[in-house]
Image: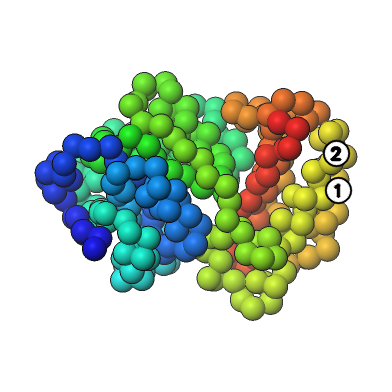
């Protein structure tokens, strides 16, 4: 049985044994299940957190609309034999008068950070706060949010936090669409068209010249006019610098909208 915890005091009372941690905002899907499975395999105990973090949403973003599906999340946690589900109230994470935020300069400003100012400041702050409360040995994140992974790895390295960040492969539908809590908002027609995002990432994979590979990927995306591209960029890893040729570790990143639904995806180059 998964034990539900609501407070920092309950966390402090847990036995101090090696803990795997999967932080989420709930609305769990098979991508989260893969993270939980890996944590359960690798650690004596696994803790899942479900907290829709207000500080990572901009004023015009979907915080209030973000899906909240606690009963289904708990059922998935039980199915995956997760030991603890931490579902705190906001005051537990941000006690009244909270004024402290973590910023990871440069990495937080590009790609999604350019279009969602303050987003990675909110992510880094809540994950740091959760690490402080949960004190995990390993924390699991999906590659679908690759920029988030890079930001958190840098935070952990700079602050010398005693936790290892484990990045797990993106889980995809059979047609290539990356699993996301936001996919449920796609209309039937948009859902049918959405795999164009993955096809665009694949179209770019053999090319080394960034201008050429972006042109190929853009041409693929242009086949679906309903997809409103926000950015398509190739950047080095882990510094997220602009490059003109794919040499060393690098990834292609894409973000855009179907209607009001924002989707992101990425692919790390094989040669990397
Ligand atoms: O990836 C997410 O679901 C969130 O950004 C995270 C890491 C749980 C922080 O709120």
Residue 157 drawn at (x, y percent): 43, 23
> Is 87 on the left or on the right of 15, as rendered?
right
Residue furthest bottom as drawn: 188
Report whether residue 142 is seen. yes
Question: For the N terminus, which image quadrant?
Answer: bottom left
> Is 9 on the left or on the right of 27, as rendered?
left
- How many numbered marks appear? 2
Residue 36 drawn at (x, y percent): 41, 53
Residue 204 drawn at (x, y percent): 81, 45
Say which of 62 and 154 sits in front: 154
> Is 222 on the left or on the right of 98, as rendered?
right
Q: How many angstroms separate mark 1 from mark 2 (CA)?
A: 9 Å
Q: Residue at x 49, y 62 (%)?
A: 30
Report whether residue 228 is seen. no
* Label 2 residue SS: loop
The quarter holding residue 260 reads bottom right
Answer whether labels 1 and 2 touch (C-beta < 8 Å).
Answer: yes
Question: For the C terminus, which image quadrant?
Answer: top right
Q: Residue at x 62, y 64 (%)?
A: 173
State which tag comes first along the sequence, 1 or 2.
2
Residue marked by disc 2: 207
Say few, some or many: other residues with alpha carbon within 10 Å of mark 1 (under 14 / 14 to 19 / 20 or more).
some
Say which of 93 and 132 sits in front: 132
Q: Residue at x 61, y 59 (%)?
A: 172
Q: Which mark is residue 248?
A: none
Q: Is 207 rendered above or below residue 170?
A: above
Residue 116 drawn at (x, y percent): 52, 46
Residue marked by disc 1: 216
């Amino acid at each position: 049985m998964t034990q539900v915890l609501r407070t920092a005091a309950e966390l402090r009372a847990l036995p101090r044994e090696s803990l795997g941690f999967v932080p989420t905002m709930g609305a769990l899907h098979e991508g989260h299940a893969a993270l939980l499975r890996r944590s359960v395999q690798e650690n004596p105990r696994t803790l899942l957190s479900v907290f829709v973090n207000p500080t990572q949403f901009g004023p015009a973003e979907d915080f209030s609309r973000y899906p909240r599906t606690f009963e289904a999340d708990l059922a998935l946690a039980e199915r995956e034999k997760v030991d603890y589900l931490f579902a705190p109230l906001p005051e537990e994470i941000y006690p009244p008068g909270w004024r402290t935020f973590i910023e990871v300069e440069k990495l937080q400003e590009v790609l999604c950070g350019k279009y969602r100012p303050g987003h990675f400041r909110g992510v880094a702050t809540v994950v740091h706060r959760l690490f402080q409360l949960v004190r995990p040995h390993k924390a699991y994140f999906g590659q679908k949010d690759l920029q988030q992974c890079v930001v958190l790895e840098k935070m952990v390295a700079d602050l010398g936090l005693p936790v290892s960040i484990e990045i797990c492969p993106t889980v995809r539908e059979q047609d290539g669409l990356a699993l996301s809590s936001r996919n449920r908002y796609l209309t039937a027609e948009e859902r049918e068209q959405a795999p164009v995002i993955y096809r665009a990432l694949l179209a770019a994979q053999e090319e080394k010249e960034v201008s050429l590979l972006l042109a190929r990927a853009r041409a693929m995306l242009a086949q679906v006019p309903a997809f409103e591209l926000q950015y398509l960029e190739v950047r080095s890893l882990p510094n997220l610098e602009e490059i003109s040729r794919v040499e060393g570790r690098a990834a292609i990143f894409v973000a855009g909208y179907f209607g009001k639904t924002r989707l992101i995806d990425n692919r790390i180059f094989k040669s990397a």
